[in-house]
């Protein structure tokens, strides 16, 4: 079993008190924003079964989301939309979302643990490969980011049911790609992404009169 408290414990021992865990969701989808979260947990926080949000069922994620919202010392969310993603590329947009999430905690952090991504910020950071499976703070952030973005996809699904966003969350599944071929793209699709590029001139009829 991975010790999800190892990084936090070492930082507490060095005198850090407010540790932010940062993760993002939505680098791969063809549509919508990339979402990052920064979560600051109390030192005595414990939640059995919390890990990388991708490994949890939706029911468990939603349950953990509520518990984290209730018990966290601070939570910040950063959202960078598809237009900015197209403008700066998804890697840079992800960094912007993470920085926004850290800023939106509205507290002075002692250290930030980040899932994989290096960030150039004034706070000391540690980037951890597969951090959402190795740090309790990053795992908590992955749940907040995932549930937040999924809710956004459910809202889009009500407007554009033909893309099956409720189930694919915007990722390039067979159904999603077939729907793009049949209906074109929405104003929320990422124009810089390969499968979307060739349909730039074919806007979904729903958007034409907006």
Image (cartoon, rainbow, N blue to C red):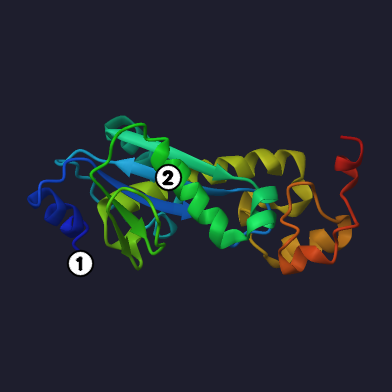
Residue 170 image position (x, y, % from top left): 65, 55
Residue 180 image position (x, y, % from top left): 81, 60
Question: Where is mark 2, residue-wise?
Answer: 37
Instruction: Work out which quarter of the rendered image holds the C terminus and state it.
Output: top right
In the image, what residue occupies the spot 37% across and 51% down? 121
In the image, what residue occupies the spot 18% across and 52% down? 8
Q: How many marks?
A: 2
User: Is residue 179 shown above or below 103?
Assistant: below
Instruction: Work out which quarter of the rendered image holds the N terminus and state it.
Output: bottom left
Q: Farthest front residue?
A: 122
Residue 146 appears in view: no
Image quadrant in which you'd find residue 113? bottom left
Residue 79 image position (x, y, % from top left): 55, 43
User: Is residue 28 shown above or below 61?
Assistant: below
Q: Farthest left residue?
A: 13
Question: Where is mark 1, residue-wise?
Answer: 1
* Secondary element type, mark 1: loop
- Judged left or right of residue 208, residue 162 is left
* Distance (Cα) linking label 1 and label 2: 25 Å
Residue 192 image position (x, y, % from top left): 72, 62
Residue 180 appears in view: yes
Nearer the observer, 94 or 27 = 94
For disc 2, the neighbor class at 10 Å (few under 14, some 14 to 19, many from 20) is many
- Judged left or right of residue 90, residue 75 is left
In the image, what residue occupies the spot 42% across and 45% down? 37
């Amino acid at each position: 079993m991975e010790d999800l408290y190892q990084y936090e414990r070492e930082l507490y021992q060095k005198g850090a008190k407010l540790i932010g865990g940062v993760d993002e969701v939505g680098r791969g989808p063809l549509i919508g924003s990339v979402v990052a979260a920064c979560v600051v947990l109390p030192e005595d926080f414990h939640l059995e079964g919390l890990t990388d949000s991708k490994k949890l069922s939706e029911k468990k994620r939603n349950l953990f989301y509520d518990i984290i919202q209730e018990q966290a010392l601070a939570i910040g969310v950063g959202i960078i939309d598809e237009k900015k993603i197209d403008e700066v590329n998804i890697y840079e947009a992800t960094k912007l979302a993470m920085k926004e999430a850290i800023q939106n905690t509205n507290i002075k952090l002692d250290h930030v643990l980040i899932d994989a991504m290096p960030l150039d910020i004034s706070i000391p950071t540690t980037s951890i490969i597969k951090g959402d499976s190795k740090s309790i703070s990053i795992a908590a952030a992955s749940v907040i980011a995932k549930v937040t973005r999924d809710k956004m996809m459910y809202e889009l699904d009500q407007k554009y049911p033909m893309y099956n966003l409720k189930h694919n969350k915007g990722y390039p599944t067979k159904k999603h790609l077939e729907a793009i071929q049949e209906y074109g793209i929405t104003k929320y699709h990422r124009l810089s992404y390969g499968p979307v590029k060739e349909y730039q001139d074919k806007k979904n009829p729903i958007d034409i009169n907006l």
